[in-house]
Image (spheres, rainbow, N blue to C red):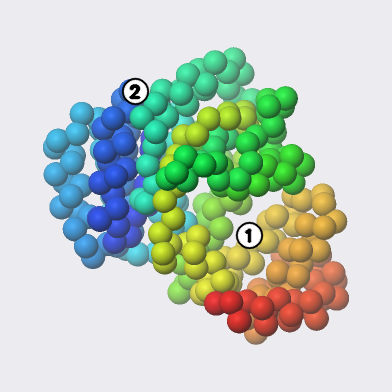
Amino acid sequence: MKSITVFTPSYNRAHLLPKLYESLIKQTSKDFVWMIIDDGSRDETKSIMEKWIVEADFEIQYHYKENGGMHTGHNLAYSLIDTELNVCIDSDDYMPIDAIAKLLDKWNSISDKKNVAGLIALDADTQGRLIGQKLPEDVQRGSYFDVYYKYKANGDKKFILRTDLLKEFPKYPEYKDEKLVPLGILYMMMGEKFPYVFFNEVVCIVDYQEGGSSNTIFKQYFQSPRGFAYARKLKLNYTKSIKEIIKYCVHLSALFFITKDIQVTFQDNKYKILSFLLLPFGFLLYLYLLKKR
């Protein structure tokens, strides 16, 4: 069995996948499986994958599903992956040629693997510039909240997850007529059970696409409000920062004005009263989102 699964949810991205495929061909270590989750594509994705499965010198797994959004692709991948580690590389991204080798070298240097959730590594853009800040050099391990709130290492990070551990956590909820649940909530929950090992190496080159999820965030508040509400409520269960608690409550209050559904904001919300008191600020955020979408 290989050590790590690189999985890629993809929807109508046949024109982008060759760059990722070429980067996997060039990997100095072939100790990986590439799993494509085709989220209902109507382009040439299937025929391209069938060709590559025959040609590639590494294992490729192709799975087709009805369109449901990025998080549903993750749900299916997590149910199928059987390698020790896994990492999501998006269809518009690719990996430096030594990324797999470096990741596995780092992982194999850890003596207490059962006491960590995985690795956190770095992303860079196509010009080689780091996206956000590096992880702290003088700290070896930490949680999701440590990275973003304690050490202020903002920007995209690449989470390499322990497969057996992630299977202990619930799948992302799948709401009717919604196509997004923020993916970071799983990384957050896993990091609260065990810390991540920090790995200050670039393992993913990010090439943001017009119309991709990163560039349509304001529209997504309106298209997937229950998914966003679920994520905000989960974060409220974990964060200890007063500033973050207020921020998430304002977000939840704004979602009330988007959905006109009181349950979206208040059901399973441990800060119901605060969210109610912050409704005026939620309305202002709603107006801002309305303008930006």
Kindly identify the amino acid type of the residue bearing the numbered disc 2: Ser
Q: Relative to 123, is 235 on the left or the right?
A: right
Residue at 27% x, 41% y: name it: 21
Q: Residue at 35% x, 64% y: name it.
A: 67
Which residue carries the number 1 mark? 231
Relative depth, front residue between 75 and 28: 28
| Occupied quadrant, residue 131 | top right
19 vs 94, left or right, is: left
Q: Quadrant of the C terminus?
A: bottom right
Q: Where does the image place residue 84, in percent across and percent down from the top left?
A: 45, 28
Q: Can see residue 95? A: yes
Which residue corresponds to mark 2?
A: 29
Camera-nearest residue between 132 and 162: 132
Task: Identify which residue is drawn at 53% across, 30% down.
Answer: 201
Q: Residues within 10 Å of mark 1 (few under 14, many from 20)?
A: many
The image quadrant of residue 189 is top right
Question: Label 2: how many residues lie within 10 Å, few (<14), some (14-19) or many (20+)?
Answer: some
**Relative side of 13 to 240, left or right:** left
The spot of residue 272 in percent (x, y) is: 80, 69
The residue type indicated by label 1 comes to: Ala
